[in-house]
Image: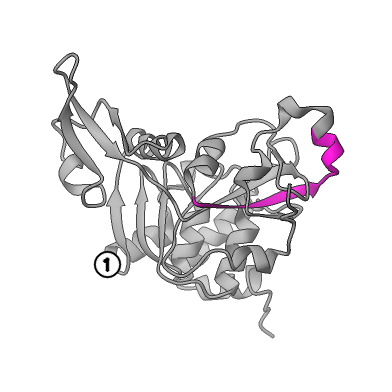
Amino acid sequence: MRRVLTSLGEAARLVKDGDVITTGGATFHRAPMEMLRELIRQGRKELVLVDREPAIDFDILIGAGCVAKVRAGLLAFELLGFAPNFRKKSQAREIVTKEGACQPIMAGFRAAAMGVPSLTVRGMLGSDLLGISEMLGSQREVEDPFTGEKLIAVRAIEPDVAILHVHEADAYGNCRIEGPHYEDVIKAKAARKVVVSAEKIVPTEEFQKRPGETTIPHFLVDAVVECPRGAYPCSCHGRYDADYDHVRVYIDAANNERFGEYLDQHVYGRVSG
């Protein structure tokens, strides 16, 4: 095994301008927020974001001007409404928005994780989604060779980088997630590179004691960073809850032309006099 433990800045530099990225967790739960804030600090541009059900993780990158395209099944803030920067930038046509559905996006990730060019799904037939939602050429109507049933073949989605946040990791990149895994394991297998932030770096012996609890093995991981509270303001199961008061501050700033002030205070650490 090789050590992949590194700094936040060095790990973020594995993400290049124009990369296709996906993030771990779901909505306000275990998103890799500190790693994304570091991408903003480094001035990353023209990113293509793909996921099933992101929220503030995608929206903060959009608001900071890091994003060219978004493909998602749903990009919203749970009961707090639509993602504000996503809405504004989409309506102004400052980003390319490709509304999809959860099922085909996950089929695309699963196909890449399995090393096959596509997987078939039911659904969407007869809807407008086939014509308006997905990236060009990413899905196609096919006929099942055994039953003759019409299905949708979804092309594999192979992100350049999957950015994940986990509870524990070791210096070699073995990772342990407590609670819901969401699609993190599938994404780790699908992506060309995997960058991980961890609440805590623990000795490898801890993984050797309970190998069955290893969620993501070291050979899938390219960089790992110790990053306590690295999901904040999102939750991290068993460690801390989502800070919805902070999320409301974020929404208010985005909706009232003060998002630059929000970034200055909460991303760049600059507080005006």
Q: How far across and down, in percent of the image, does residue 103 sit?
A: 35, 33
Residue 74 visible to the viewer: yes
Amino acid type at circle 1 is Arg
Residue at image location 55% in from the left, 39% down from the top: 184
Of residues 256 and 243, the one nearer the viewer is: 243
* Side of 1 relative to 243 (left or right): right
- The colouring scheme, among rainbow, by chain, secondary structure or one colour, is one colour
First to last magenta residue range = 192-207
Residue 26 visible to the viewer: no
* Side of 184 relative to 46 (left or right): right
The answer to whether residue 205 is magenta is yes
Q: Quadrant of residue 101?
A: top left
Q: How far across and down, in percent of the image, does residue 187 sit?
A: 50, 42
Residue at image location 31% in from the left, 69% down from the top: 94
Q: Quadrant of residue 176?
A: top right
Q: Kindly give the residue lying farthest to the front in the view shown.
A: 1
The answer to whether residue 196 is magenta is yes
Of residues 265 and 16, the one nearer the viewer is: 16
Residue at image location 80% in from the left, 48% down from the top: 201
Q: How far across and down, in percent of the image, does residue 32 sit?
A: 61, 52
Vertical arrangement, residue 115 with respect to residue 234, above or below: above
Kindly state the secondary structure of the residue where label 1 is placed.
Answer: loop
Q: Kindly give the residue lying farthest to the top in the view shown.
A: 147
Q: How far across and down, in percent of the image, does residue 216 sit?
A: 64, 38
In the picture, which quadrant includes the C terminus? Answer: bottom right
* Side of 84 relative to 183 (left or right): left
- Give the residue number, with chain letter if any, for mark 1: 93
Of residues 82 and 95, the one nearer the viewer is: 95
Residue at image location 67% in from the left, 69% down from the top: 9
